[in-house]
Amino acid sequence: MNKLVKPLFLTFAAVIVSVSASVVLAADPVIGTWQLNPTKTTAALAAVYKSQTRTYSQAGTGLALVIKTVLADGKESTTQTTYQLDGKDYPVTGDPNYDTISGKQIDASKAEFVLKRGGKQVGATDRTISKDGKTLTAKTKITTASGPTLEGNLIFDKQ
């Protein structure tokens, strides 16, 4: 009996390790480079941004995000963060409007984020990846550091 159980156990363990590895290695659909599509972006937000490129990459168990922005007035900025979708606050550098971000995964294509400045919530973003994986929509509402509230949809095309 022992001679039968051991090979079955080893086979079962190998299958579990294989399945676990494939789940861990399954790429998050947001990973890659995304370019703002101003013609599809909500008019109010399209007027604020001349261009924006978001680059998401795997960083251990989390995601690293670099956002390169050119505003309508020509000012350039680079925002960076590394975060996990666990609801905890993670530091953000390079954006005067918020200094931490927390996110939660809703399903395979959607995540929700809270943006904070000085520990106080100043905005939120719902990020959705289209079924074909080619479009990222960031439904955003934020009260800027200078006072006005911006709201709308930023639409990005995968590069």
Image: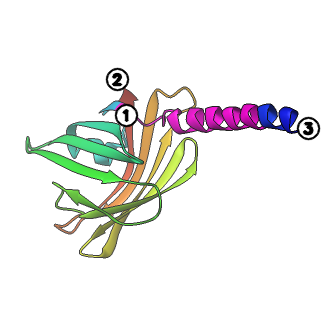
Tell me if 130 is positioned left or right of 20 in this view. left
- Mark linked to residue 156: 1
Q: Nearer the viewer, residue 110 or 88?
A: 88
Question: Which quarter of the figure is the C terminus placed in?
Answer: top left
Q: Nearer the viewer, residue 138 or 159?
A: 159
Q: Main secondary structure of the magenta part?
A: helix
Q: Amino acid at mark 1?
A: Phe
| Residue identifier under label 2 | 159
Q: Are marks 2 and 3 in contact (CB under 8 Å)?
A: no
Region of the chain picked out in magenta, as a range: 9-32
Q: Is residue 53 magenta?
A: no
Q: Amino acid at mark 2?
A: Gln
Q: Are marks 3 and 1 in contact (CB under 8 Å)?
A: no
Q: Nearer the viewer, mark 2 or mark 1?
A: 2
Question: Which quarter of the figure is the N terminus placed in?
Answer: top right
**CA gap, disc 3 and disc 1:** 59 Å
| Residue identifier under label 3 | 1
**CA gap, disc 2 and disc 1:** 9 Å
Q: Residue at x 56, y 35 (%)?
A: 21
Quadrant housing residue 9? top right
Q: Is residue 40 visible?
A: no
Q: Is residue 43 visible?
A: yes
Q: Nearer the viewer, residue 93 or 95?
A: 93
